[in-house]
Amino acid sequence: MKHLVRTSKNLGHAIRQARKAKNLTQTELAAMSGVWQETISKIENGSGGTKLETLFDLVAALDLEITVTERSKGTSDGLEDIF
């Protein structure tokens, strides 16, 4: 699974997709990661203001990693994804 993430909404979608691919509920992911279920819900819905450490806890629990690369000039889903 590979996702282009440029916004908190994109990241939330990627986390939701990874969670569902592993057949986990938000409650199960919360137990695995130590992150409150309510926080997972907010992240998956694209709410900002989440601590970076919390995101890394979720990424680790889902057995994912984050790669940082130069921004591509390819197509995007919307104008807000460009900035």
Image: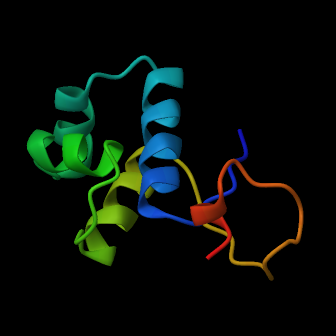
Q: Position of residue 13 (x, y in %)?
A: 48, 41
**Residue, x 28% and y 66% (percent of image)?**
48
**Residue, x 25% and y 49% (percent of image)?**
33
Q: Farthest residue to the front: give it.
A: 79
**Residue, x 48% and y 55% (percent of image)?**
11
Q: Quadrant of residue 71?
A: bottom right
**Residue, x 42% and y 61% (percent of image)?**
8
Q: Quadrant of residue 23?
A: top left
Q: Nearer the viewer, residue 1 or 64?
A: 1
Relative horizontal placement of residue 40, taking residue 65 as reference (left or right): left
Q: Position of residue 61 (x, y in %)?
A: 38, 48
Q: Nearer the viewer, residue 81 or 53?
A: 81
Where is the C terminus found, in terms of image quarters?
Answer: bottom right
Q: How many marks?
A: 0
Q: Farthest residue to the top: give it.
A: 23
Q: Is residue 10 above or below residue 79?
A: above
Q: Is residue 35 above or below residue 72?
A: above
Q: Position of residue 52 (x, y in %)?
A: 33, 76
Q: Is residue 41 above or below residue 4?
A: above
Relative horizontal placement of residue 71, taking residue 52 as reference (left or right): right
Q: Nearer the viewer, residue 23 or 8?
A: 8
Q: Position of residue 10 (x, y in %)?
A: 52, 52
Relative horizontal placement of residue 28, taking residue 10 as reference (left or right): left
